[in-house]
Image: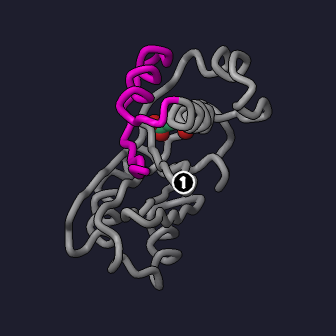
Amino acid sequence: MCGIVGILNSSSLKNNSIDILKKLEYRGYDSAGISLFSKERIKTIKSVGKISELKNKAQNISDKNFYGVIGHTRWATHGVVSKNNAHPFANDDLTLVCNGIIENYRKIQNRFVEIPKNIQSDTETSFYFLTYLVNKYKNSDEAIRVFKSVIKGNYAFVIFIKKK
Ligand code: GLU
């Protein structure tokens, strides 16, 4: 399945993450994306297709005011190949990428009204679920603990949550 990367405190977050994704491209080339993050903000760039597409798209983006990055190159398992279904999934406070499959994502969608019902992607479902938990507990450790106890499958996540 996919390739994932997370880097902190590098002087070249954008180029290093894209170079690593390029090395992992054989694991998935449906779409790719990165989220750069700092205490203030999260900046996400996604594209359908190979890493070269992402590289072009990110060309004029500066990573100067960020201290970390997460990235993903996708092998779609749930949800069509599209920009919307590309990882990372992010809002102003949280960004995540996932390698693998969340088997019970439909059950989770049906159980929580906070999760939109038209989502096809297991990872987007996980993103809404974690967002809901972070807002509910106001504590990222507790949110992650509950998240892990509910989701079932074979997976690895890289997650950044901004401290409030
Ligand atoms: N299940 C996720 C998706 O379809 C991740 C697949 C992967 O590991 O690339 O987006």
Q: Residue at x 66, y 36 (%)?
A: 79
Q: How many marks?
A: 1
Residue 162: x and y, percent? 41, 52
Q: With 37 as the anchor, is 103 left or right in this view?
A: right
State the residue at coordinates (44%, 73%). Answer: 55
Judge left or right: residue 138 versus residue 10: right
- Say which of 53 and 10 sits in front: 10
Whether residue 113 is situated above or below residue 54 in the rendered picture:
above
Q: Which residues are magenta?
A: 137-164
Q: Is residue 49 left or right of residue 4?
A: right
Does the segment drawn in magenta span residue 101? Answer: no
Outermost residue, left direction? 10
Q: Which residue is mark 1?
A: 31
Q: Is 151 contained in the magenta span? A: yes
Q: Going by the picture, which residue comes out furthest to the right?
A: 118
Amino acid at the residue labelled 1: Ser
> Tag 1: Cα neighbours inside 10 Å, few (<14), some, or many (≥20)?
many
Residue 73 x, y percent position in the rendering? 44, 50
In the image, residue 68 above or below residue 93: below
- In the rendered structure, the answer to whether residue 82 lies left or right of residue 26 reads right
Q: Nearer the viewer, residue 124 or 114?
A: 114
Q: Quadrant of residue 21?
A: bottom left
Residue 101, x across and y down, in percent: 49, 26
